[in-house]
Amino acid sequence: MTDQFLIERPTFDPATGQARFSYALGGLHFVETLDMPAGADSAAATSPNFLKLLDLTGFVLGVSYFKLKAPFEIAAPEIALSEAERAFAIDVYENGLGEFYARNDLPRFGKLTINAPVDPVERLPALDLPDRTLLPIGGGKDSLVSVDLLSHTGVSFTPFAVNPKGPILTSVETIGTPPVYVTRTLDAEMIRLGSQPGYYNGHVPSTAINSMIAALCSLLFGYNQIVLSNERSASEGNVEFDGRETNHQYSKSLGFELLIADVLANATGGALKYFSLLRPYSEARIASLFTHEDKFDHVFSSCNRNFRLTGNDGPLWCGECPKCHFVFLIFAPFMAKDRLLSIFGKDLLHNPANEASFRELAGLAGQKPWECVGEILEAAACLYTLTRHADWHQAAVVRAIKADLLAQYGEPKLQAAMAECLTDSHDHHIPPALAAKVAAYAV
Ligand SMILES: CC(=O)N[C@H]1[C@@H](OP(=O)(O)OP(=O)(O)OC[C@H]2O[C@@H](n3ccc(=O)[nH]c3=O)[C@H](O)[C@@H]2O)O[C@H](CO)[C@@H](O)[C@@H]1O[C@H](C)C(=O)N[C@@H](C)C(=O)N[C@@H](CCC(=O)O)C(=O)O
Ligand SMILES: Nc1ncnc2c1ncn2[C@@H]1O[C@H](COP(=O)(O)OP(=O)(O)OP(=O)(O)O)[C@@H](O)[C@H]1O
């Protein structure tokens, strides 16, 4: 077995805007690059704060290469880590790869070691960052709800995306504000090996990756806050494995948000803030907020087939995956039926072939899918609402599932769950003044 994953010190060339990240695994060598837009602040690019973030980004991007063999030792002899940074890196390589370990049956929790020098400095001196907001755009409903909330509370923002394609590009065009786009080029040999015998493959924490890239851009282009659009439902995991709950969406969870926010604050002397604007909300509540604005209806998509590295040549919504089914389900109670059908191009709840998938989403069969879907009880509550909805109670899937849904949960629990979905949580880290404005708008 390969016994070590080596992370070399990343480099950044202010003249070209290119960052290079080099890794070694056994006899294999890999390089990943990030190409930032022109116009970076060259002084910022040589600051200790930026170099610290670059080092940490090297750790986070490394997961794609590490996973080919998943050795127990990670070595970074040139990168000094404070105690909190080491804990952050372990979290990314353990919980961030939780789905990968569970699906490949690899017990790694609590067993990884990082061999890197100790950085005695816990917090770097403060940077001066302008009061500006970077808003990552994923092409789906969530970040567009953040667009609506920020726009209506008077917070201007710059859209940000890594490898923008399809719905990200069309959504940003519709927003109409010039974006910051970064081109991320993964090592082609790593992608090739991922499908070869003797190598592992699986899910990586993409939000952690995109967030670190956003942090680099915040320093290079002058932003003091990164606003994520991660819902509270993202904190619910999928299955227990090796003594822990694993979560497909781990790097969207509240726990991870707190860790990364702390690391970014320490690297910038408190100058860079990181929080999710949608943390108070369930996915169902986000769906209800999305209905307020229809200008994105035909440019957005939450279907992940759009976001493969090679892009998508199919329809905006495949209509077959759990994410399409889940998003259709949570829109249905809140959106006019003809609008919903015009977005998806078909009625996913009236196709008996989809019954098994909706059963999984609602916890009536199998396990929560390894996909970006909301909580089991949330899906069950939305389905229950549809059993009493004039437009939907006759839909084939709703009729087929109704009796089992009521038998499993009972009406009082489903009613309470729907009420809970529509009640905003206070467990969030939005700056208080912004939280108050958003709460006043999002009634
Ligand atoms: C688009 C997508 O969902 N991709 C997942 C899929 O990969 P697939 O092979 O179908 O296509 P590609 O994404 O083009 O990947 C090709 C190969 O490259 C590897 N790879 C890709 C990106 C990367 O950063 N590192 C890589 O090593 C990949 O393993 C392939 O071999 O299945 C993969 C295996 O399960 C997933 O890892 C791919 O997921 C992407 C990394 C991705 O960006 N997914 C997001 C849409 C996503 O799932 N977001 C979650 C949040 C997860 C989190 O914790 O942050 C969400 O929205 O809930
Ligand atoms: N390519 C990307 N570049 C930058 N940020 C991204 C990218 N893809 C996703 N994100 C961000 O990561 C977070 C999680 O993505 P997620 O897919 O849940 O959001 P979304 O695309 O807005 O909505 P949906 O859940 O409907 O797909 C969001 O804040 C999103 O803006």
Image (cartoon, rainbow, N blue to C red):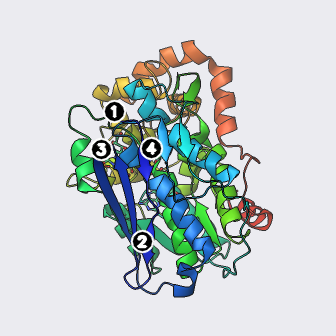
Say whether residue 10 is visible: yes
Which sits in the foreground, 84 or 174? 84
Asked if disc 4 is less than 8 Å from ligand 2, the answer is yes
**Is residue 67 found left or right of 261 in the rendered image?**
left
Which sits in the foreground, 288 or 21? 21
Residue to which mark 3 is pinned: 346
The crowd level at tag 3 (other Cα within 10 Å; few <14, some 14-19, many 20+) is few
Above or below, 41 relative to 312 = below
Residue type (three-letter) at the residue carrying disc 3: Lys
Residue to which mark 4 is pinned: 327
What is the secondary structure assignment of the residue under circle 4?
Answer: helix
- Cα distance between the residues tagged 4 and 2: 21 Å
Q: Position of residue 363 (x, y in %)?
A: 50, 22
The crowd level at tag 2 (other Cα within 10 Å; few <14, some 14-19, many 20+) is many
Residue type (three-letter) at the residue carrying disc 4: Val
Marks 2,1: beta carbons within 8 A: no
- Cα distance between the residues tagged 2 and 3: 25 Å
- Cα distance between the residues tagged 1 and 3: 9 Å
Residue to which mark 1 is pinned: 350
Say whether residue 147 is visible: no
* First in residue order: circle 2 vs circle 3: 2
Residue furthest top as drawn: 407
Residue to which mark 2 is pinned: 172
Marks 4,1: beta carbons within 8 A: no
Q: Position of residue 124 (x, y in %)?
A: 71, 69
Which sits in the foreground, 140 or 88? 88
What is the secondary structure assignment of the residue under circle 1?
Answer: helix
* First in residue order: circle 4 vs circle 3: 4
Residue type (three-letter) at the residue carrying disc 1: His
